[in-house]
Amino acid sequence: MLRVFFYLLALVSLSSAQRLTSNLGPVVDLGYTAYAGNTTSPTGVSSGPVAFYGNIRYAQPPLGKLRFRAPAMLDEDTVTSQVLDARDWGPSCIQRPAVVGIGTEDCLTLNVWKPTNASAGDGLPVAVYIHGGGFYANSPQGFPMYDWVAQHPGGIIGVSITYRLNMLGFLGGPVVAADGDLNTGLLDQRAGLEWVQRHIANAGGASIIMQVVAYGGSKSVPFKRATAQSIGFGPTNTADQTNAFFTSAAGFIGCPASGSDAMPCMRNASLGAIVSAINRIPNGAFAPVIEGADGFLPDLPSRLIASGRMNNVEFVGGHCTGDGKTFAVGKPEDFQTDDDIRRLVFSRWPGVSNATIDQALAIYPEPNATGSPFPTQWDRAWTMAGEIIFTCMDWFLAEKLISNGVKNVFSFSWNAPDTVIFNQTPYLGAAHTSDLYYLFDGTNTFGNAGNTFTPFNTSEAVLSKEAIAYWTSFAATGNPSTDKESISPTWEFFVGPESSRRRIVLTRGSNTSTNSTMESLTEAEMQRCQFWMSEEVTAETRV
């Protein structure tokens, strides 16, 4: 199932002032609370150490009367004299498949990494990571930011946020809207970002799309720039589908599906009943929903972008070259005819009409057609599966930001496989999430049981260091090349000479340098993206 990973980046200041101390480790004092963290020097990095503070609450526990409601702000007025232990991660939110005892409903916490030598007035940039996982899985624990903080030459602070998932984060329908809040998982993300804005001076993608277009751009966003990796979501459920999933959930839990007793019953239900219902309802049932004019998500993101109802932020957007291979819903040998593409690729997009599929097949020429760029039906299928959303949504947002006058817009294509995934399924190439393998210390598995890490070989380590330098440079300055590695190519702006569209292709090389290089988007690819992002087609894909 879809895993989407995005970064939200903001520029704020840092203060190291402290009132309290602890023998547990370095203390960060927020006034209303204080935390003791620990220090670590990442492997192979000599510029550390880095201080880590985990399990920091950014909102009240979403329990009891606060279940299915927007996150409630903490009491931040009372001065504390107690130092809490923040040397480890906070718990993950309830996942899917859900298991009582693995993850918790009380999960609204964040994690902070900072240079131990940071001092007041440094004005360090902050990179905030919001994990992906299709809005039903994962947690920040698989994405450590030690290397980000230790490697950046000017100093940077890393933050990661946990937010409610699946039914607990995205239960929808008019009954919820009347006695609760919609898209509470997205509201959690926003609350975490707002906590960062309030307190970081003391503490040191689908999500990015949703946050950029939140409230139709009528409210400012609490970040200055954003990086979206492998934008992928949808089809967004219709109102009828959302209502049906609510009815199913209420039935499995043993609550009425309508009336004033429905939500009180859902809030009083045992966690075991919630977990059982999550596992009995199809995956994808609970994800961001369209709320209407005054809601957090007033319309489909594609429509909000097209109409300019969004916030103008500096932007990096890109995809893995194997995103489409990961989501083509088949193996190379499964694709021999047009009907195979219809049956497999479009199984993920049930709202797409036969007429639209015919149009798509026409603009992706058959392998035997003169001048076709697709040597096989498999290449045709995975290119289509990738461009429907992953490749074309980041192109679409980049184009709109450029037209709105934003200069600092950049694009990338990740062409280095996650070695673990590649060894298991080589036909996927640089599969979905391959970029995360390099950006987060060799993360290669996710799930309720935790995460595993595979040590880099030398050439992988070179690409990892190059990529982290680009990403943190953009976070700090708005330009990936400002603080890049000296051996790395300059990452050019999205708009190149003579209005060409440019992106960097990140690729492994030798033990001393990568093979990363710039390339121009082809006219054919941009025309295909214009098709997928057209109002007529997005009305069917619902992205």
Image (cartoon, helix red, strand yellow):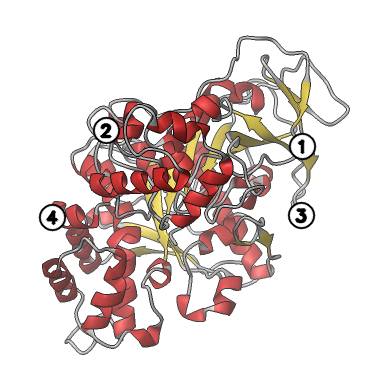
Q: Earlier in the sequence, mark 3 or mark 1?
A: 3
Residue pictured at 49% horizontal, 65% vertical: 516
Residue underneath mark 1: 87
Q: Earlier in the sequence, mark 1 or mark 4?
A: 1
Q: Three-letter amino acid code at disc 3?
A: Thr
Residue underneath mark 2: 216
**Count of numbered marks:** 4
Image marks 4 and 2: residues in contact by CB distance under 8 Å = no
Residue 106 visible in the snapshot? yes
Residue 476 percent coordinates (x, y)? 52, 37
Residue 224 percent coordinates (x, y)? 43, 32
Q: Three-letter amino acid code at disc 4?
A: Glu
**For residue 212, which numbered disc appears in the image?**
none
Residue underneath mark 3: 43
Q: Three-letter amino acid code at disc 1?
A: Arg
Towards the viewer: 2 or 471:
2
Between the residue at mark 1 and the residue at mark 4, the CA separation in whole angstroms equals 51 Å
Image marks 2 and 1: residues in contact by CB distance under 8 Å = no
Between the residue at mark 2 and the residue at mark 3, the CA separation in whole angstroms equals 43 Å
Residue 311 visible in the snapshot? no
Disc 1 element: loop
Disc 2 element: helix
Q: Left of 177 or right of it: where is 471? A: right
Residue pictured at 64% horizontal, 61% vertical: 442
Residue extending farthest left: 355
Between the residue at mark 4 and the residue at mark 3, the CA separation in whole angstroms equals 51 Å
Where is residue 292, by image quadrant?
A: top left
Mark 1 is surrounded, within 10 Å at the Cα level, by few (under 14), some (14 to 19) or many (20 or more) other residues, namely: many
Residue underneath mark 4: 536
Towards the viewer: 465 or 162:
162
